[in-house]
Amino acid sequence: MPPAVLRRTRLPLPLDGTSGDAETTLPLTVPLDLARTLGPVVHGHGDPTIRIGAHEVWRAWRTSAGPATLRIRIAGRVVQARAWGPGAGVAVENSGRLIGLSDAPEAFAPTNRVLADLVHRFPGLRLPASGSVMGALVPAILEQKVTGIEARRTWRALLREHGEPAPGPAGAAGMRLLPDGATLAAIPSFTWHRLGVERRRASIIGRAARHADRLETETPERATARLRAIPGIGLWTIAEVARVAWGDPDAVSVGDFHLPSLVAWALAGEARADDARMLELLAPYAGQRGRVQRLIEVSGIGMPRRGPRMTPGDIRAI
């Protein structure tokens, strides 16, 4: 599925005079493109869990210690982080990882002309680590076998109808938390149908939701093993979790409808490719294949359009 178009949004949230439950300041010693870096964390325009401006971001999620809202503001050469809610301490602790400050893009030095040019064009692009497995997993499941328009519409409806207001001032401004595991597991199939989700994807979310607490607290290795054991969760979904929640620079979205041909066009000038060919082209970049994917996604490189495009549907009409 092609990446969402990320639009910088106005942030009608109080910036001063509202104290948080936890705060910290971090040095900013590297280039940082906040909007492009956080692109994988955003699930469509109007995502109620996150708002991004030119120099700041507000994000609401369920940390391992409880719900939190985090505000990150870039002020010159420092990053100011402030958080509200029971999970405020964890949110502030994760603030640098969220915006890619724990990423190491300098480890990638491609000799390929196209990739070297993209590294030069996007020096502030870093790989984020959201720290939220369910926050990455549920949208990935919603995106299985449907268009991005459908998946993002359902994501917004799910947050609106079954989420809860974010802690602190963000809640009053309309930001929402993803429902907790127990709530997700209890949503009946007819409600999922009304939201535009058929029984198969609804069942996968329900099964995953029963593991939510452990998925959020386990190591990436143990959480990956747990995800593999859940029927309906395959390589594509696990890769989405790895690259969004943990910032894995080698996670490749195998099984994506568009990505193999996009990678093949960017790296080899080939208009059509399958997963095997994509992995062959990415093999020289082992350890950094996910970074190559992200660079190509933001590059604006477009492949020739041939044949029918996937048409959005609506199972609520069935």
Image (spheres, rainbow, N blue to C red):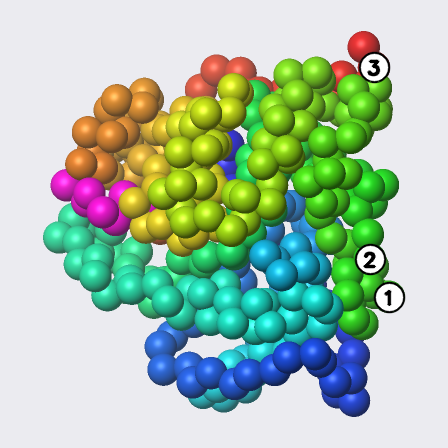
Residue for badge 1: 172
Residue at the disc numbered 2: 165
Q: What type is the residue that disc 2 sits on?
A: Pro
User: Which marked residue is nearer to the observer: mark 3 or mark 2?
Assistant: 2
Mark 2 burial class by Cα count in 10 Å: few <14, some 14-19, many 20+: many
Residue 60 visible within the image: no
Quarter of the image for residue 120 reads: bottom left
* Label 1 packing within 10 angstroms: few (<14), some (14-19), many (20+): few
Q: Using the image, determine if residue 12 lies above or below residue 109.
A: below
Q: Is residue 78 visible?
A: yes
Q: CA distance from mark 3 to mark 2?
A: 30 Å
| Tag 1 and tag 2, C-beta contact below 8 Å | yes
Say whether disc 3 or disc 2 marks the residue closer to the N-terminus: 2
Q: Which residues are magenta?
A: 284-291
Image coordinates for residue 132, horizontal then vertical, percent = 55, 51
Query: Alpha-carbon neighbours of circle 3 within 10 Å: few (<14), some, or many (≥20)?
Result: few
Q: Amino acid at mark 3?
A: Ala
Residue at image coords 58%, 36%: 211
Instruction: Point out the frontmost of discs 1 and 3.
Output: 1
Gap between marks 1 and 2, in whole Å? 7 Å
Quadrant holding the C terminus:
top right
Q: Secondary structure at mark 3?
A: helix
